[in-house]
Each structure stands twice: as C-alpha cells, then as structure tokens.
Amino acid sequence: MRVNARRAVVMTAAVVALLLAVLFSLAVGARAIAPSAVLDALLHGGHSDAAEVVREMRVPRTVLGVMVGAALAVAGTALQGITRNPIADPGILGISQGASVGVVFAIAYAGTHTLTGYVWYAFAGAGLAAVAVYAIAAGGRGGATPVKLALGGAALNALLVSVTTGVLTTKASALDEFRFWQVGALSGRDATIVHQTWPFLLAGLVLVLAVARGLDALALGEDVAKGLGQNVALVRVVGGLGATLLTGAGVAAAGPIAFTGLAVPHIARALVGSDHRWVLPLAAVLGPVMLLASDTVGRIVFPPSEVPAGVMTALIGVPFLVTLVRRKAVAA
C-alpha cells in the first residue's frame, strides 16, 4: 500500500507538471501573454489579438505537443519492454527513419508539399519499417529475440538512411523542404494535423496498455513469461503494433523528435518502479511535459527566432538521463 501511495503522489505531481507545461506553452512565446488572458481566451471566448493568438496558433501547437510527447514516450516504453533492451526507442529500431523515407518519397516523387499530405506517407513508412524489422528478426532459429530485434533495427536504420540520402542527392529540390520536416518541431502545425493523427494515437495507446501485464512478465525472461501463462508472441505483436501506430502518427505529425522515446521511460521507471501499469501512464504524462517544456524554451532562447523542439529535447533530456545513469537509477 505504501508503494502504491507513493506512486499515486508521483502521478499527481506529474499531472500538475503537465498542466503547468500546457499553461506556459499557451502563454510564453515571441509575444508573452498573461495567464489570465490565456484563461479568458479559452473559457470566455475573448476576441482580443491575444485571444486570437492563443486559440488559432498556440492551442493546436500545444495539443499536438501533448499528443506527440505521449505517443513517443509510450512507444519507447513499449519497445524497451518488448526487446528487453534499455536503449531501444523508435529511432534506434528504424521506425522513425522509415517515416523519413516515406516523407522523402512523398516530396520527391508524389508531388506532396503540405504537412497534411506528409502524414500518410510518414505513417506508411513507419509501419513498413516495423514490419521489416520484425520479419528480419523472426527469421532463423529462436524467432524474434531481443538481440535480433536490435540488430535488425540497426541494420534497417542504416539502409533507410542511405536510401534517404540517395534520394535527396538526386532530387536537390526536395532537400530544403525535407529539412524543415526532418528537424522535428511543433511550429507550423495546425488543427488539421491533430484531427488526422489522434485516432491512430488512441488506438496505439489502447494496444500498448492492453499488454502491460505481458510486458512485466516478459521482463523476467521468455521462459518465465510463458510459465506465467503469457503468450509471448502475442504480447510482442500487439505491443509492437501499438508502438508502431504511436511512432508513425507522432513522427508523421511533428517529425522525428529526438530523445523523448529513450529518456522518458527511464525517468518513469526511476520514479515508480518497473510495473508497466504505472510506467506506461506516467510516461504518457512525462513525455508531453518534456516536449512542451522543450518547445517553450526553444521559443525564447534566441528571440525572435525559434530553436526547434527536436533540438531542445536532446539538450534538456540528456542531463536527466546522465544523472540517472550516474545514480544507477536506470532500470533495464
């Protein structure tokens, strides 16, 4: 009971941090807006210039930050549990790079030049990359073991980077447009992106949460998990499908945001232990906190220019992970 009470306190504190991150995301930027004006715009429908900025520009950006942060953090948690590899995340396993290849092909060959158009190609690329990684790892003896999944992901990631580079060197006109997406950012996204991606994010969350107990058992080893009555293959397929949906939609919407899927799961485990019934919800809250904080800081460090959120997540996230490693608080 004492452990669960502590976990409840941590979860409550994380939710409060998320609410504060949302408020600062709506209030802070090239033009600072008082929190009272933000609340007035949201609750009372004000028509001032500040209210229009909040509703038309910052609300979609903030909502997308919450969605993408939660998606990448939960996907990273699931992939680390499935592969039993503490450094697994959508980027390392090639899923994010698959989305990048989809966007490159959309720009270079399909004549797609809008973010709303990129979404579907990025999602398809991420899905195909995930299937390819699992197919590579499942071949041969032993099936899709953690080591084979990691090696297969690394090999596919290298291949996809080469494909992306090859296309961009032969289609120079696509380079600048792709660079804008590749850096990873929440700016320039509107409510249309939110409407297109939320069903995939919701489906991915449901699938990953459905195998939370299975991930706990899998952490003890395949033989132990089978002895506890878990269908290991089913846990991996369902969890992997959920992680792919989350990664595909999140990366498609905001670009390949770095570090969130790697650092947040470790921070969550350090706070509430290894029980995925607590780790997954906490990661879903801490992921948006990290991404929104990164995005907000990026707006104000070099005004009037912005540092993309994908750059700031690494700058903010690395010290957290280094501190946890030095304290030996990172759980595998």
Image: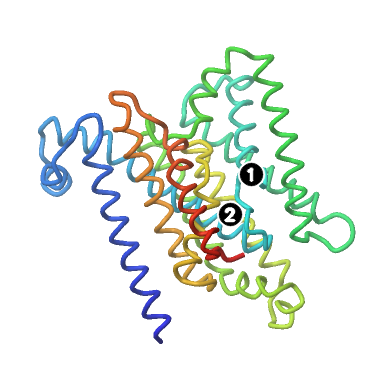
Across and down, in percent, residue 240 comes to 64, 57
Q: Position of residue 114 (x, y in %)?
A: 47, 25
Left or right of residue 164, residue 301 in this image: left
Q: How is the image coloured?
A: rainbow
Picture quarter with the C terminus: bottom right
In this picture, residue 246 sits left or right of residue 195:
right
**Helix, strand or loop at mark 2:** helix
Residue at the spot of label 1:
95
Which three-letter amino acid code belongs to the residue tagged 2?
A: Ala
State whether residue 159 is above or below residue 114: below
Q: Residue at x 17, y 46 (%)?
A: 42
Q: Residue 137 carries which label?
A: none
Side of 302 where 119 appears, left or right: right
Residue drawn at x 71%, y 48% is 131
Q: Look at label 1 and name its amino acid.
A: Ile
As helix, strand or loop, the secondary structure at mark 1 comes to helix
Furthest-front residue in this view: 326
Q: Where is residue 43 in the image (x, y as percent from the top left)?
A: 14, 49
Eyeballing the image, is 220 above or below 76?
A: below
Q: Where is residue 215 in the image (x, y as percent from the top left)?
A: 62, 69
Who comes first in sequence, dot 2 or dot 1? 1
In the picture as drawn, the residue positioned furthest to the right comes out as 141
- Mark 2–mark 1 CB contact (< 8 Å): yes
Query: Quadrant of the rendered structure where residue 78 is?
Result: bottom right
In the picture, residue 156 is in which quadrant? Answer: top right
Total residue callouts? 2
Q: Residue furthest bottom?
A: 1
Q: Residue at x 24, y 42 (%)?
A: 26
Q: Mark 2 points at which residue?
A: 243
Bin the neighbour count of mark 2 within 10 Å (Cα to Cα): few under 14, some 14-19, many 20 and up. Answer: many
| Left or right, residue 112 beside residue 43 | right
Residue appearing at x 36%, y 68% in the figure: 11
